DNA sequence: GTTAGGGTTGTTATAATATAACATTATGTA
DNA sequence: TACATAATGTTATATTATAACAACCCTAAC
């Protein structure tokens, strides 16, 4: 079992890269950037990405097939994620809004489905691009 | 300009297929199913899908790269979409909840971003699978 | 210390998803 | 008619993601 916050070599390399990136990174962008560090093939990247998502260290922006580091202590292992995405400059911000998070976590589907997790993506123009 | 609700041949073929499907359809599944009707290549499918999304006739389930017909009069050209997704049987339902839709449409980001659109995906187990 | 198990890594090949670029045909409208 | 716009057809290719298998490295139990 993975120790808390104790990342393996490849996990650390890829997490660092994503963490210091101001923008979401795509799997192959990551691959190109870590090849000099010995991570040479797609499966190595995708495996680490899956693991980091599972740990809640990063999130996948589904509409962009790209990954960002988690900046939020409220999303508890990626069970409640929300992002704002600028359609022009493509800046992505993780939204930390406890009210929003609670509202959605308590939302119950009419058809009796019990939700374990949600992902919300807002699109628009950021302050700079508006 | 496309007349309201007046679909072209390929659009009609692909919309019909998606509309009558109980589950989200992927682009290549669609392609295989319409090849007998003369739609032979991926770009033909993707173009129609883009157009139908733009018209609000279908929605893309981002986490599944699949498409469902819009069952909802409230999402006004796909500006406010929400889905429930069963992680076991993969059933997807479009959520029509005016309160939820209003709540999210009125949500304002702290950083001053003005949202034009959102997409929300809930995950869990449906009644049957729970 | 050895050995068994789980997690991680390395590697090759290939599957699945999506778009570029360009030629052609239809449709609506001045 | 003639022009503009949308839709279609086609080939090739780019991008995103996984299958499958071998090897390695812990560490906990015997």
Image (spheres, coloured by chain):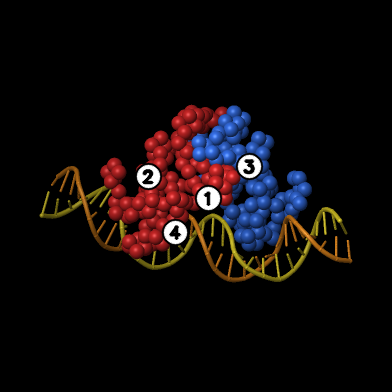
Chain colours: A red, B blue, C yellow, D orange
Q: Which mark is residue B78?
A: 3
Q: Residues within 10 Å of mark 1 (few under 14, many from 20)?
A: some
Disc 2 and disc 4 on one polypeptide chain: yes
Residue that mark 2 sits on:
A57
State the CA–CA distance, disc 4 to disc 1: 18 Å
State the CA–CA distance, disc 2 to disc 4: 19 Å
Please indicate whether residue A85 sits to the left or right of residue B42 in the image. Answer: left
Q: Element type at marker 3?
A: loop
Q: CB atoms at circles 4 and 1 under 8 Å apart?
A: no
Residue A104 rendering spot, x and y as whole percentages: 50, 32
Closer to the camera, B62 or A92? A92
Q: CB atoms at circles 2 and 3 under 8 Å apart?
A: no
Q: Which mark is residue A90?
A: 1
Q: Element type at marker 2?
A: loop
Quadrant of the snapshot with the C terminus of chain A: top right
Residue at the (57%, 31%) spot, across then down: B103
State the CA–CA distance, disc 2 to disc 1: 21 Å
Residue D17 rendering spot, x and y as whole percentages: 46, 54
Host chain of mark 4: A
Which one is in front in this view, the residue at disc 2 or the one at disc 1? 1
Host chain of mark 3: B
Disc 1 and disc 3 on one polypeptide chain: no
Residue that mark 4 sits on:
A28
Q: CB atoms at circles 4 and 3 under 8 Å apart?
A: no
């Amino acid at each position: 079992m993975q120790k808390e916050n104790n990342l393996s070599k490849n996990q650390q390399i890829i997490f660092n890269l994503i963490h210091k990136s101001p923008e979401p990174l795509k799997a192959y962008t990551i691959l190109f950037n870590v090849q000099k560090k010995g991570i040479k093939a797609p499966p190595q990247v995708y495996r680490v990405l899956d693991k980091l998502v599972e740990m809640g260290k990063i999130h996948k922006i589904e509409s962009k097939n790209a990954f960002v580091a988690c900046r939020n202590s409220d999303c508890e292992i990626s069970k409640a994620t929300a992002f704002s995405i600028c359609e022009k400059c493509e800046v992505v911000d993780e939204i930390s809004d406890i009210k929003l998070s609670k509202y959605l976590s308590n939302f119950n589907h009419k058809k009796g489905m019990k939700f374990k997790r949600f992902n919300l993506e807002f699109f628009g123009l950021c302050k700079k691009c508006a």
